[in-house]
Image (tube, grey):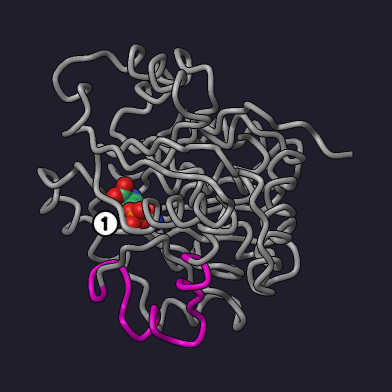
Amino acid sequence: MAVNLKGKDLLTLHDWSSEEIWQVLKTAEHLKRLRHMGQRFEPLSGKTLAMIFAKPSTRTRVSFEAGVTQLGGHALYLSTNDLQLGRGETIADTGRVLSRFVDAIMIRTFKHSHVEELAEAATVPVINGLTDDYHPCQVLADLLTIYEKKGRIEGLKLAYVGDGNNMTHSLMLGGAKLGMSVVCASPAGLSPNPAIVEKARAAAAATGAEISVVNSAAAAVAGADIVYTDVFVSMGQDADRERKLQALAGYRITTALMAQAKPDALFMHCLPAHRGEEVEAAVIDGPQSVVFDEAENRLHAQNGLMVLVM
Ligand code: CP
Ligand code: NVA
């Protein structure tokens, strides 16, 4: 039975049931097939998506903008430098005003609480395009990629190695909801937020997934179906750059580390990547890497999401 997702916000995957997440993935699969067959499908005709960006972006901006166009609608790129938001207009007023003009708002910003404030004030659906704490759209694309490559999600093990960040949090929540175990290997002081790990564990209780945090990268990747990493220094963290690079030096994904995962393990990375920093070029450009399929799936996963919520 399909659930009605019209008007629903996507702030974190914690607020979405496994049934709702699967509905996005199945819709995405269908839309991807239509697009690859060259068939037009324009359910967003006459609709507009506002896209607020307080941080840079390649994938998120282009996949949302191109996606809305493909679905017959129009997307507006709004930098916080150009909006009155940059001159002191409140987030709530921005949300109220934009809701009078557009059919959904996507936002990429720093504090997660700002996205919550926006969603509280807006009367149209709000989509989180990355905050300091979460990146749910990326994980929808990642789950779609895993499903395509492995034929299932439940029962798999994903090892995330590196900085315990927004990606780690969203992967843990997404994995927990769909029954995929997620283990994060990070050095002391750079582990994911314990409160979010706890939320993921609580959600995992219903699906049998295991959510854990360890220090050893080798222990994490043992038996893993997917090895995942992300940049060592996220947007907005440049002041902490040297400390992070030092602490994470032993957490690079090398061919030797990949060899300790399952032989058919996938290598995933949300991108942008820094070859030689969090991952060796031989891994990200090697046969186990699916990073560009993963990037393409941003488009299809978000198209599925928009068709359902807008
Ligand atoms: N993965 C991702 O969100 O990429 P961008 O920062 O380029 O949007
Ligand atoms: N953790 C990274 C993800 C980029 C898509 C960042 O926040 O910069």
Return the residue nearer the eye: 200 or 298.
Answer: 298
Give the residue type at disc 1.
Answer: Phe
Extreme-right residue of the structure: 1
How many numbered marks appear?
Answer: 1
Q: Is residue 34 left or right of residue 192?
A: right
Task: List x then y, in percent, for residue 32.
Answer: 65, 64
Q: Residue at x 25, y 69 (%)?
A: 274
Q: Is residue 196 left or right of residue 95?
A: right
Q: Is residue 37 left or right of residue 106?
A: right
In the figure, 288 relative to 307: above or below? Answer: below
User: Label 1: which residue?
Assistant: 232
Q: Residue at x 61, y 69 (%)?
A: 225
Looking at the rendered image, the quarter that the N terminus falls into is top right
* 115 magenta-colored: no
Report the span colored magenta. 275-295
Q: In terms of image quadrants, where is residue 165?
A: top left
User: Regarding mark 1 in the picture, which secondary structure is present there?
Assistant: loop
Q: Residue at x 38, y 39 (%)?
A: 51
Q: Is residue 186 visible?
A: no
Task: List x then y, in percent, for residue 16.
Answer: 65, 33
Return the residue nearer the eye: 228 or 121.
Answer: 121
* 279 magenta-colored: yes
Q: In terms of image quadrants, where is residue 151?
A: bottom right
